[in-house]
Amino acid sequence: MKAIVERIRTEGKNLGSGILKVDSFVNHQLDPALTVEMGQAFARRFAALGVTGITKIITAEVSGIAPALTTAMALGVPAIYARKSRPITMPSGYFRAEAPSHTKGGIVDLIVSPEYLHPDDRVILIDDFLATGLTIDALASLVAECGATLCGIGCIIEKSFEQGRARLAHLNVPIVTLAIVTSMEGDDIVVVNPEEG
Amino acid sequence: MKAIVERIRTEGKNLGSGILKVDSFVNHQLDPALTVEMGQAFARRFAALGVTGITKIITAEVSGIAPALTTAMALGVPAIYARKSRPITMPSGYFRAEAPSHTKGGIVDLIVSPEYLHPDDRVILIDDFLATGLTIDALASLVAECGATLCGIGCIIEKSFEQGRARLAHLNVPIVTLAIVTSMEGDDIVVVNPEEG
């Protein structure tokens, strides 16, 4: 997606250790028009790949919520955000998986209630980054545990040098990313638009 | 907002201790059309109250993000979600306030980067619940610390029996809520639409 590639080029900051700062439009501040466009881009590209009949979007709190909501808007289906700790409103018998936190360190839980994710659901996972793929893999395991069908994975920004795409290949579903960062060396962030081949 | 009042009546659950469970459309699963309508309702009602020239929507992660984004969409301005822990992408010199967690217990930090909130900003605060008002009061203190102007407060659901509106009266800005729960006794949740007087 051209607008995201341009925002990464002008606003992205390489903080070292593979951390790309995009707080101005993904991880702290949100540009609503851009975020709506992300959702429309995911919907359009999944449709072009023959991914249809989706009934739920699933993401992980916190930074996945905005693009998951706009993708849900574009597809007209509910979005669920996996919680990182169990709120007192959630019944027992929930689905839980573990994922490492890329920006905070440590391991976080991802928790989804069986009240809203069902075996007949057809799911697209949405998140902000595709880096190591471990968070997405954890979300995919929740979908599998529930017996729902995983149909696609969409992330705003792929850091291809962290090999997440290879890690997720076993899931055997289309992976759509809107901008691909192929390398970061000092101030030199190389980012390409996957739709321009 | 009629649709929210109806959803609370059909899907809301009183879990005791003042906790209203609305995980099916606010705190775990999101209905995108309803969430868009929430943002439009906030924009319309603030405009009717003469609240204009807004430049930023501010909320607290996690459950405020969705209504903050759709309000930002309706007003065409950026949204900022205050973080509960400082990500490694955030520079020092941030604004920090403390608020108690209603559903998780303990005290949480609310952190906003000075990179995105400026003294000339005119701010509406958006959150899911107006209960005790302590979270909103903490967000308001961040706005004051920055020197920006607080212009309004919007929450999806007001639990009027927790007196948040009185606590926030000192801020002297309009408070808009879309549904007001006046009492919860067992399965009897009394909810009114503030637009129906």
Image: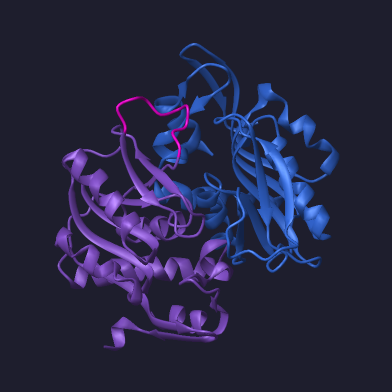
Chain colours: A purple, B blue
* B129 relative to A67 in the view: left or right: right
Comparing A36 with B27, the one in front is B27
Comparing B74 with A109, the one in front is A109
Comparing A46 with A22, the one in front is A22
- Horizontal and vertical percent position of residue A80: 36, 46
Residue A53 sits in quarter: bottom left
Residue located at (48% from left, 71% from top): A17
Tell me the quadrant of the picture where the C terminus of chain B can be found.
Answer: top right
Vertically, is B91 above or below A117? Answer: below
Q: Which residues are magenta?
A: A85-94
* A54 relative to B91 in the view: left or right: left
- Horizontal and vertical percent position of residue B61: 56, 48
The kind of secondary structure the magenta stretch mainly shows is loop
Vertically, is B19 above or below B89? Answer: above
- Horizontal and vertical percent position of residue A163: 29, 71
Vertically, is A60 above or below A167? Answer: above
Tell me the quadrant of the picture where the N terminus of chain B can be found.
Answer: top right
Q: How many marks?
A: 0
Residue A114 sits in quarter: top left
- Horizontal and vertical percent position of residue A69: 41, 55
Does A86 lie within the magenta span?
A: yes
Residue located at (22% from left, 61% from top): A152
